[in-house]
Image (spheres, grey):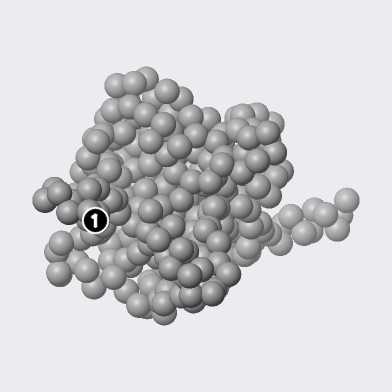
Amino acid sequence: MHHENNEGSVSSSAPRVSTSGRSVWETGQQQAARQRGNRYSRLSLEHPARMLPAIAAHAIATYTRPGDVVLDPMCGIGTTLVEAAHQDRRAVGIELEPKWASIARLNLETAAVQGATGSGEVHTGDAAEIAARLAKTALAGRVRLVITSPPYGSMTHGQVRSRRDGADTVEKTAYTYSRDRDRRAANLAYQRPQALADSFARIMAACRDLLAPDGVVVVTTRPFRKDGKLIDFPGQITQACQEAGLVQIDRCAALLCAVRDGEVVGRTSFFQLVEVRRLRKGGVPVHVVQHEDALVFTNPSTQKNKEREVRAA
């Protein structure tokens, strides 16, 4: 099953740096399980928070061309890498946790067996350190797209299943990023908000040296609630990217819900539904989040060149 973005592929004459043309990406038309189909190993389900394949596919088709290099510095089970390989791109992933890195490699092998014309590789270790090392190789200045999603909001993580003992409750599974205490300090999923933002800024700064002159960075994230309060995580990540020296050029909404005949078909996690119902009972007028914020950045030099071109025209 092939999952292209809803707008189709970018032609060879498309500009390297551009917006998607639409601020809303229709990336939730199919349920996540159907989007993944047989492209991904069942082991992928053990990851707490996987990027929706259609979001990755849309960003890749919008901001790159066949043959371009796509980098994900926190690639998890390799969703961005698999979608890039199926669109004839060269995918490079970095993953701190050996378990997820192994599954990402397995998913790339599956893509190759299924006829993907692109290629992929996965490096295991600290994202900033490996990106800095890769910047000393021939990969420096060749990455057209950095795409990633930092961990956020425990309500979006994990799976639920009925209790095996027959109790009328559910139990949560697959919600842990790492069981290694030594690596947890470096894992963004276990850092406090400010430390997480600082770590993400460090990763983005390291990735800048890998970006092509007209390269683009896409970060997907969403607001989440903690203790009933809405946390502006997209705003925190935007600030982190700006501290890394990147310039924001777009902010889009990648839908997690479907739109059919003018009606919204909701898709949300069990945990988010439970939290929303709890808050509503307490008189708080909240709603479920039905989109990811797709934050788009470029290098300052690229942005300045575009501004000069506009003034000259």
Q: Position of residue 261 (x, y in %)?
A: 68, 33
Mark 1 crowdedness (10 Å alpha carbons): few <14, some 14-19, many ≥20:
few
On the image, the x and y values in percent for residue 119 come to: 37, 32
Locate residue 74 relative to residue 208 in the image: left or right. Answer: left
Q: Does residue 175 appear in the picture of this structure?
A: yes
**Amino acid type at image mark 1:** Thr
Query: Where does label 1 land, which residue?
Result: 169
Residue farthest to the left, as pictured: 165
- Above or below, comparing residue 71 to residue 114 in the picture: below
Residue name at image x 86 percent, y 58 percent: 311
- Label 1, secondary structure: give it: loop
- Quarter of the image where the N terminus is located: top left
Name the spot of residue 215 as percent of width and height, x first: 56, 50
Q: Is residue 3 above or below residue 17?
A: above
Q: Residue furthest right?
A: 313
Question: In front here: 102 or 177?
Answer: 177
The one nearer the camera, 12 or 161, is: 161
Query: What's the residue at 17%, 54% (across, down)?
Result: 167
Q: Examine the rendering and report whether any part of residue 19 can be seen.
A: no
Question: Left or right: where does residue 310 sit relative to residue 251?
Answer: right
User: In the rendered image, which quarter is residue 104 located in?
Assistant: top left
Residue in front for this viewpoint, 217 or 305: 217
Q: Residue at x 26, y 34 (%)?
A: 41
> Horizontal placement of 283 versus 98: left or right?
right
**Left or right: residue 24 compared with residue 75:** right
Please tell me in which quadrant of the rendered image residue 296 appears: bottom right
Image mark count: 1
- Residue 227: % across, % down: 41, 77
- Residue at (65% x, 29% y) in the render: 11
